[in-house]
Image: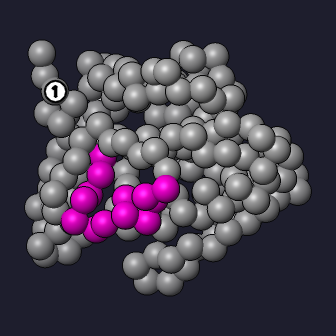
Amino acid sequence: MKRLEDYVTSIPDFPEEGIVFRDVTTILEDADGLALAVNGLRDMLEGVEYDTVVGPESRGFIFGVPVAYAEHKSFIPVRKKGKLPREVVSADYELEYGTATIELHRDSIKPGQKVVIIDDLIATGGTIEAIIKLVEELGGVVVKICFIMELSGLKGVDKLEKYDVESLIVYEGK
């Protein structure tokens, strides 16, 4: 049987020379790869008490929804600024060249609600830090953060040291 990392396509020198781009879409394009990813995330959550799964667009949706569905939990989407129709809370975060803003519906998380965050990749950690800020601002408690892949050379996990963080695949580089 193949391992999950066997389904990831590595593309050298993209988007620039010296970078190896880890393409998660090739996991999605294979039924066995997708099953390994979703089941791996579910295994990470074994024994974890939680109420809801939170995931950022778009790949957090792709991996978070099947986990929430299989575990009979709700799913809360984190969206880019201006995409949610009700009253929102927002947080800015750093990008390589500038900043971006993410939002949650103000009433999506209840005080004391136990939250799991699922996303495809942890790189610098800026997006996840912003999501944590929003969840905690609304009174939620982040009990676990799960990723398909981690780029350990970018040290994003270091910013999350007070949280339970786990990745299915860890790549040493950037």
- The chosen color scheme is one colour
Q: Is residue 87 above or below residue 75?
A: below
In this rendered view, identify the residue nearer to me: 88 or 152. Answer: 152
Which quadrant would residue 72 be assigned to in this image? top right
The percent position of residue 32, horizontal first and vertical second, equals 26, 19
Q: Is residue 72 above or below residue 147?
A: above
Question: Could you tell me which residue is drawn at 60 percent across and 26 percent down?
Answer: 49
Q: Is residue 111 left or right of residue 119?
A: right
The percent position of residue 135, horizontal first and vertical second, equals 69, 52
In this rendered view, identify the residue nearer to me: 161 or 137. Answer: 161
Residue 56 makes an appearance in the image: yes
**154 magenta-colored:** yes
Q: How many marks?
A: 1
Q: Is residue 153 left or right of residue 51?
A: left
- Bounds of the magenta segment: 149-162
Q: Amino acid at mark 1?
A: Arg
Question: Could you tell me which residue is drawn at 24 percent across and 41 percent down?
Answer: 169
In this rendered view, identify the residue nearer to me: 43 or 67. Answer: 43
Q: Is residue 81 above or below residue 121?
A: below
Which quadrant would residue 156 be assigned to in this image? bottom left
**150 magenta-colored:** yes
Q: Is residue 132 left or right of residue 134?
A: left
Question: Could you tell me which residue is drawn at 20 percent across and 74 percent down?
Answer: 16
Q: Is residue 132 left or right of residue 85?
A: left
Q: Which residue is mark 1?
A: 3
Question: Could you tell me which residue is drawn at 56 percent across and 30 percent down?
Answer: 65
